[in-house]
Amino acid sequence: MGTIHNDGTVVFRGAGDLGGAVVLHQGVALIGRGTIAALDGIDLRIENAVDVGGLRISAPRSVSAIGADPLEHVLFSRVRIDGAIRLDELDWQDGHLDTTGPVTVSGVARLSNDPRHFSYMRDRPLGKQIDTDFTFLQ
């Protein structure tokens, strides 16, 4: 169907109170050693295995009512990948990463959370949910 050749940075960014969604279907190939960034509450689904330079998940979007605490209602980005992930670098901040295959990171892996985003979320514990095999090579 098509190819996205990325040797730089491709940013997928949410908008509005719903964040937004992008699907890269099975026929779309992602090639190159660039970085994919999922920001501002985007729901990014990639229906293939991924082998890229980097993945960044961060920058939750505040969807609070006017005058309310901006951290009270936060929309986190979500990256869903059907298959294995091979990365040179992983920067997984506040957001979700769901994959059906193993994750391998050959370089730096940063996993972090801003506890302020979780202070109002009693049903979601602070931290990462890892439901598949992760391998860190460095």
Image (spheres, helix red, strand yellow):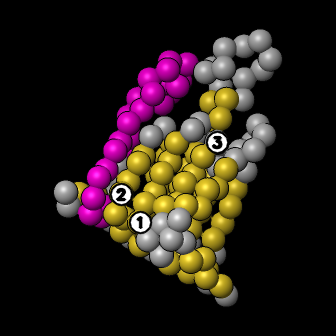
Q: CA distance from mark 3 to mark 2?
A: 20 Å
Q: Which mark is residue 89?
A: 2
- Pinpoint residue 87: horizontal percent, then vertical percent: 36, 64
Between 126 and 31, the one lying in front of the other is: 31
Residue carrying label 3? 40
Amino acid at dot 1: Gly
Pair 3/1: label in front: 1
Please give left or right for residue 46 compared with residue 2 in the image: left
Q: Residues within 10 Å of mark 1 (few under 14, many from 20)?
A: many
Residue for point 60% across, 46% down: 39
Q: Is residue 123 left or right of residue 111?
A: right
The CA distance from mark 1 to mark 2 is 6 Å
Q: Secondary structure at mark 3?
A: loop
Labelled pair 1, 2 in contact (Cβ < 8 Å): yes
The mark nearer the N terminus, 3 or 1, is 3
* Label number found at residue 53: 1
Crowding at dot 3, Cα within 10 Å, few <14 / some 14-19 / many 20+, comes out as many
Q: Residue furthest left?
A: 138
Q: Does dot 1 land on a helix, a strand or a loop? A: strand
Q: Residue at x 41, y 66 (%)?
A: 53
Give the residues in magenta: 104-129
The image quadrant that residue 11 belongs to is bottom right
Q: Magenta includes 101?
A: no
Mark closest to the chain's N terminus, 3 or 2: 3
- Residue 99 percent across, percent down from the top left: 44, 61
Between disc 1 and disc 2, whose residue precedes? 1
In the image, is residue 123 part of the stretch drawn in magenta? yes
- Badge 2 marks a residue whose secondary structure is strand
Q: Position of residue 92 (x, y in %)?
A: 42, 46
